[in-house]
Image: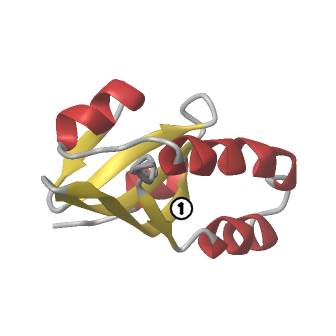
Amino acid sequence: MAEEAKPKRNHLMSRKMFRDFVASHRGTERDLETFLAWCKTVEKTDWRNFGDAKVTFGSADKIGDLTCFNVGGNKYRVLAEVIFRADNSAMVLIRYVLTHKEYDKLDLG
């Protein structure tokens, strides 16, 4: 009997950044579940290229070497380094978790 292959899924790193963000931003604790739901969505998908990420999150944009995701109804921005691999699921490294206002002030250039 052949062993069944496990489905490939993205590998999300730096989930702790969401807890740190909530701890340092008063009033955001009510959105922790939103952040965790975003994490679960990333972890259950299989991205091989930016197009796959865009299918999962239609508002995803490329900002230099990072991918920007709108989270919480455009309330927050998650900037991640996404390492796409043709032969395996993506590695997603969270670099920034920001409010919309913080994102507007961020200089990535």
In the image, residue 25 above or below residue 70:
below
Of residues 44 and 81, the one nearer the viewer is: 44
Q: Residue at x 53, y 74 (%)?
A: 14
- Helix, strand or loop at label 1? It is strand
Q: How is the image coloured?
A: secondary structure
| Amino acid on which disc 1 is placed | Val
Instruction: Residue 102: give x, y in percent of width and height.
Output: 50, 58
Q: Residue at x 20, y 41 (%)?
A: 50
In the image, residue 40 above or below residue 65:
above
Q: Residue under circle 1?
A: 97
Q: Residue at x 44, y 63 (%)?
A: 11
- Number of marks in the image? 1
Instruction: Residue 86: give x, y in percent of width and height.
Output: 12, 53
Instruction: Residue 21: give x, y in percent of width and height.
Output: 68, 68
Say left or right for 27 vs 37: right
Q: Quadrant of the C terminus?
A: bottom left
Q: Residue at x 14, y 58 (%)?
A: 64
Tell me if mark 1 has few (under 14), some (14-19) or many (20+) residues whose alpha carbon lies within 10 angstroms of its own. Answer: many
Instruction: Residue 105: give x, y in percent of width and height.
Output: 40, 59
Residue 17 position by quadrant: bottom right
Of residues 45 and 38, the one nearer the viewer is: 45
Say left or right for 86 vs 71: left
Of residues 65 and 14, the one nearer the viewer is: 14
